[in-house]
Structures are given as structure tokens and as C-alpha cells.
Image: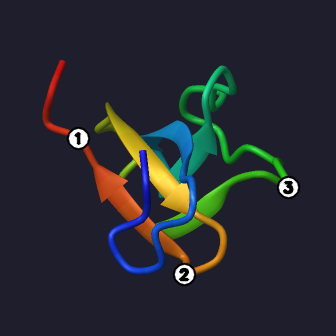
């Protein structure tokens, strides 16, 4: 996917949440109910560890833009 702002290639990954809402590169998973230590994640907020979720998302390292797909 191309970035909407700069037209560079975006990295595929996912938005996951537990104790924080973060973007992870494709293939990397967060450890459920525990704060993960991962240099590749991009934290975008915090959330309750009792709730969780996952959505496909693309990240542009240049613009720091995250695009979330609603397609399953």
C-alpha cells in the first residue's frame, strides 16, 4: 500500500491492544495481557488489558501515518 501523504510504500502490520494500543509489523504478536517489549512497535495510545482487538493496518515510517483497514 502507498502512503496517502508521501506516496512511499507502507509496512503491513496490525493494530493490537491489551494494556496499550500499538502497531506491530506483520507476523509479530503481542503477548496477551502483558506489556510487550518490542522495538518495532509504534504505540498510539493506552487501553484496558481486559479488552483486546486486532485490525490490519499499514504504517509509513516517513510520515508516521497509520492507515487501518476495515477489510477482513
Mark 1 — residue? Answer: 69
Q: Earlier in the sequence, mark 2 or mark 3?
A: 3
Taking the spot 42% from the left edge, 64% from the top edge, the residue there is 3
Q: Against 29, is 61 above or below?
A: below
Would you call the spot at circle 3 few (<14 residues within 10 Å), some (14-19), or many (20 or more)? few
Mark 1 → mark 3, Cα distance in angstroms: 23 Å
Taking the spot 82% from the left edge, 48% from the top edge, the residue there is 38
Q: Secondary structure at mark 1?
A: loop
Mark 2 → mark 3, Cα distance in angstroms: 18 Å
Mark 3 — residue? Answer: 39
Q: Position of residue 22 (x, y in %)?
A: 52, 55
Q: Is residue 25 left or right of residue 39?
A: left
Taking the spot 56% from the left edge, 64% from the top edge, the residue there is 8
Q: Position of residue 31 (x, y in %)?
A: 66, 27
Q: Against 58, is 14 above or below?
A: above
Mark 2 — residue? Answer: 63
Amino acid at each position: 500500500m502507498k502512503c496517502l501523504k508521501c506516496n512511499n510504500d507502507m509496512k503491513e502490520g496490525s493494530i493490537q491492544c491489551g494494556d496499550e494500543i500499538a502497531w506491530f509489523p506483520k507476523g509479530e504478536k503481542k503477548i496477551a495481557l502483558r506489556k510487550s517489549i518490542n522495538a518495532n512497535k509504534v504505540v498510539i495510545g493506552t487501553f484496558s488489558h481486559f479488552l483486546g482487538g486486532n485490525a490490519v493496518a499499514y504504517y509509513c515510517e516517513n510520515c508516521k501515518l497509520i492507515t487501518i483497514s476495515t477489510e477482513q
